[in-house]
Image (tube, grey):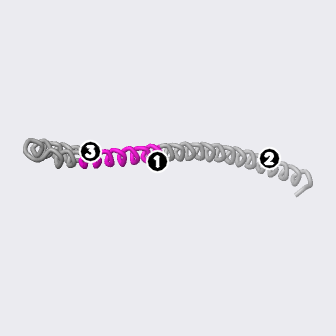
Amino acid sequence: MSTNDLVTELKAHIKELTSEKEELNKTVALKDSRIKQLLNKIEDANREVRAIAKKMEDCKEETEAAREETERAKKRIKQIKNTLGGGVLEEADEDTEKRAQSEEI
């Protein structure tokens, strides 16, 4: 092989390598872009999970407060019943308990 042939072959090889390098750089850039998109989606999902957890905690607190209020109401009804005696209040107490049980369901 002559020197000119070697130079031509080296130039062709350099051109191929340069082309491969450009393709690889494009691929890396696309993958970086995709990774950034996925990270953004993960961050959004994490924010949503935190917001839902906060709402769940709020609902839990509200439910607990409602249960406590129900218990206080039951105690108050019982006190009134004991103070005034039985009779008509017993029927009202039974109705109240039935309503409370149906609300718990």
Instruction: Tell me which amino acid carries mark 2.
Output: Lys
User: How would you rate the neighbour count of disc 2 (Cα within 10 Å): few for under 14, some for 14-19, many for 20 or more?
Assistant: few
Disc ID at residue 73: 3
Instruction: Tell me which amino acid carries mark 1.
Output: Ala
Q: Residue furthest left?
A: 87
Q: What distance separates the C-alpha of mark 3 from that of mark 1?
A: 30 Å
Q: Residue furthest right?
A: 3
Q: Position of residue 78 (x, y in %)?
A: 20, 49
Classify residue 69 by image quadrant: top left
Q: What distance separates the C-alpha of mark 2 from that of mark 1?
A: 57 Å
Say whether residue 6 is left or right of residue 99. right
Q: For marks 3 and 1, give the one nearer the viewer.
A: 3
Instruction: Tell me which amino acid carries mark 3.
Output: Ala
Say which residue appears at 86% left-offset and 49% top-offset.
8
Q: Residue furthest bottom?
A: 1
Foreground pick, 68 / 76: 76
Q: What distance separates the C-alpha of mark 2 from that of mark 3?
A: 86 Å
Q: Position of residue 44 (x, y in %)?
A: 55, 42
Say whether residue 91 is left or right of residue 67. left
User: How would you rate the neighbour count of disc 1 (Cα within 10 Å): few for under 14, some for 14-19, many for 20 or more?
Assistant: few
Give the residue pinned by disc 2: 15
Residue 82 shown in magenta: no
Residue 54 shown in magenta: yes
Sequence-first tag of 2 and 3: 2
Q: Secondary structure at mark 3?
A: helix
Foreground pick, 3 / 35: 35
Span of residues in magenta: 52-75
Give the residue pinned by disc 1: 53
Q: Secondary structure at mark 1?
A: helix
Classify residue 84 by image quadrant: top left
* Secondary structure character of the magenta stretch overall: helix
